[in-house]
Image (tube, helix red, strand yellow):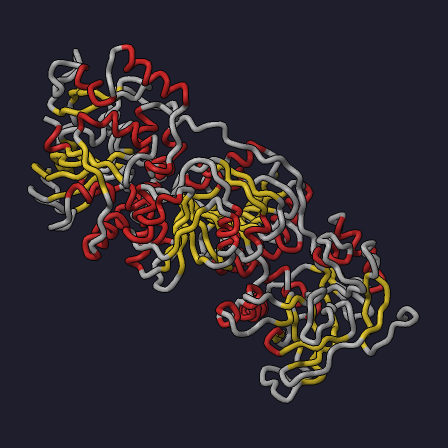
Amino acid sequence: MAREGEKGDCIGWAARDASGVLSPYKFNRRPLGNDDISIKITHCGVCYADVLWTRNQHHDSNYPLVPGHEIVGVVTDAGASVACFKTGDIVGVGTYVNSCRECEYCNACTEHHCAKGATWTFNSIDIDGTFTKGGYSSYIVVHQRYCFLIPEGYPPAMAAPLLCAGITVYSPMKHYNMNQPGKSLGVVGLGGLGHMAVKFAKSFGLNVTVFSTSASKEEEAIEILGADKFVISSDKQQMQSLTKSLDFIIDTASGKHPLDAYVTMLKPHGVLVFVGSIGEVRLQSLDLLHGSKAIAASAVGGTKDIQEMIEFCAANKIYPQIEMIHVQDINEALDRLVNKDVKYRFSSWSWTRNWTGVVRGRRLEQARVFEKLVRWNLLGAGAWACCAGANAQVKSTREQAMHKARAADHGWNSRSLLLLVSKDSAMAGEGEKGDCIGWAARDESGILSPYKFNRRSLGNDDVFIKITHCGVCYADVIWTRNQLHDSNYPLVPGHEIVGVITEAGASVTCFKTGDLVGVGTYVNSCRECEYCNAHTEHLCAKGATRTFNSSDIDGTFTKGGYSSYIVVHQRYCFLIPEGYPPAMAAPLLCAGITVYSPMKRYHMNQPGKSLGVIGLGGLGHMAVKFAKSFGLNVTVFSTSASKQEEALQILGADKFVISSDKQQMQSLTKSLDFIIDTASGKHPLDAYISILKPHGILVIVGAIGEVKLQSLDLIHGSKAIAASAVGGTKDIQEMIDFCAANKIYPQIETIQIQDINEALDRLVNRDVKYRFVIDIENSLK
């Protein structure tokens, strides 16, 4: 019975206050419109969202509140314009019941991201001005667009959880291509969402690993749900054994828990998607950069995906595991839900009998932080991505002081310092010999001086390149000054190399003597693994051989492009098209590919889309150039107002924003499709995430330290953060050819090798527009 004074023809159960206690309640539904259907509710799932809003945990509950958004029932009446349904159809209603139907998201059938805001099934403003009331009730009136046909023979009670729990995991699995047979998926948590993720994954043909804090769930994960592996997430040894083993992870566990351990389990280009509110997200940017990985969030799905998912479940006999309850037991069920005492969802036969619910596993753990990386193999290509000179971190005060003090003791300035190393600036240091002349750092002061050494012999697949130019990247500062504590001296830096082939091995087919070629950040890889076979050699499973400070095939350490020549396997060389200036080609080999590769991978080449570029250094200015060639609308973000003219007038950006100006930043809310972050060093991301449109992605290409933001910032809009470092051989050649065809040229300052120490200091102090390039041919004699 309803309480005294309450009246209407719809009978429901409602919470009257923040206690969340539900009791019978009578009210009226809005009249049936031309496009509406009236549904007699037979079943309604019980979701944790019902707890959140009945107990006012988001501080926006409007009482009396009738919850429930996993609704199944029978069509009893239809408006004059209804074409999709007829009386007697079994239908479902999910988390929303209206949207504007005019915006780009509604037009794309992603109505849950409606630009004007979707109308949620309960506790939202309806078209008649009242608050919507959910499925804990006898009937509901809904526009036909937001209803879904339940196929004949599919159990109505089991259909209910599909409308929220099912679509919440199905939608991101589809969006991030987690439906490829043979791929591997990790599922974190085994509640209402987690068990559906396992069922979908097995139907897709994936190899599934379940992560749980509870050992008691192993049998149900393996024997009942068919998972391939079960892991106790608190067991460090088990977790570490899975490093780089998973293509995807879907995290269904709500509540605070760290992500860094899971990110290390992802293979290169792996994606972790969380679908529950996990509080604050904290992890190191290098965790993402190493392997070019991504973390994303997702919430429910659009109408097209929902109907597709329901039909997929029917065709593949995928059924949620439910427990039926009577509506009179709803308060007890909600308490059990809070206490995680349900496998896996509650469901009922009618509004007066049984209902369905979800447990979203919760774990409280503390996020850890990487203290440091001590080997290049751990850092991967990511460190090379922090090469934007204008945006890179500066050396420690202690190191700078040491550098300056040494120079001051001898009365040297930056330019004359190296000239005093020996009487002949082209001579090697005492005891050093060889036919290759380079400039090397001998210790962590990072001071470079002339150095002679031998290159390895020319192999059948190698080319001998006389170096004409070499770009100066911030990575050269990092390793010459031993900032990662893994530098091997003498160290010859340089990985933006351009030169002329003067000799080729017997098996070389790609090049001939006289060709102008480039060499980038790596010079070898295993050539056998899945990444090498996919032409993403920088992600080689055995570790790519870096152009300098890496172990070469002859056992010596590689030495870079601050030198007279280099010997390289033909696979890792790139043809520079005729007429393209050699000096300008050099920065393409690191700065260029570092931004081009993620722009291509994440489809930032769609004319008419909008891109934000954070930072305007060596990488940032190339991102602007590529974006304008792709036909994008470009907004540049910088802390320096002095860069406005060059961004707009010289580089052709469409808008310039001072990132420290809160008003300017807030004015851009939900305005950009993509953001590429080229700024190294610590800076917050939350303000930029709010600027992304739904399904927007922010890609980090510099080491920014700790990534820290609220999970809801990503969940609201199903957004993603990814990282990327350099690119594979196929992308590099494609990028070079694209630059030549579209007359895209880096803006450079050419220097002599004798000025390299001054140039490196200027790079640290962000005094370059935008890339130094050493004229090796004319200054290294």
Q: In which quarter of the image is residue 357?
A: bottom right
Q: Is residue 451 above or below residue 768?
A: above
Front residue of this view, candidates 628 and 200: 628
Q: Which residue lies furthest to the bottom in this view?
A: 80
Residue 236 in the image: state x and y as whole percent: 57, 32
Q: In which quarter of the image is residue 771?
A: top left
Residue 265 in the image: state x and y as whole percent: 49, 40
Residue 455 in the image: state x and y as whole percent: 16, 26
Residue 699 in the image: state x and y as whole percent: 42, 48
**Residue 605 visible, this orientation:** yes
Q: Quadrant of residue 117?
A: bottom right
Q: Residue at x 28, y 19 (%)?
A: 489
Front residue of this view, candidates 413 and 586: 413
**Residue 381 visible, this orientation:** no
Q: Which residue is drawn at 66% across and 71% down?
A: 93
Q: Which residue is drawn at 35% across and 16% down?
A: 402
Front residue of this view, candidates 493 and 627: 627
Query: How many dots with numbers?
Result: 0
Query: For the C terminus, which image quadrant?
Result: top left
Asked whether, in this view, residue 355 is left or right of residue 381, the answer is right
Q: Is residue 216 above or below residue 633?
A: above
Query: For the N terminus, which image quadrant?
Result: bottom right
Asked whether, in this view, residue 67 is left or right of residue 97, the answer is right
Asked whether, in this view, residue 776 is left or right of residue 533, the answer is left
Q: Residue at x 55, y 35 (%)?
A: 238
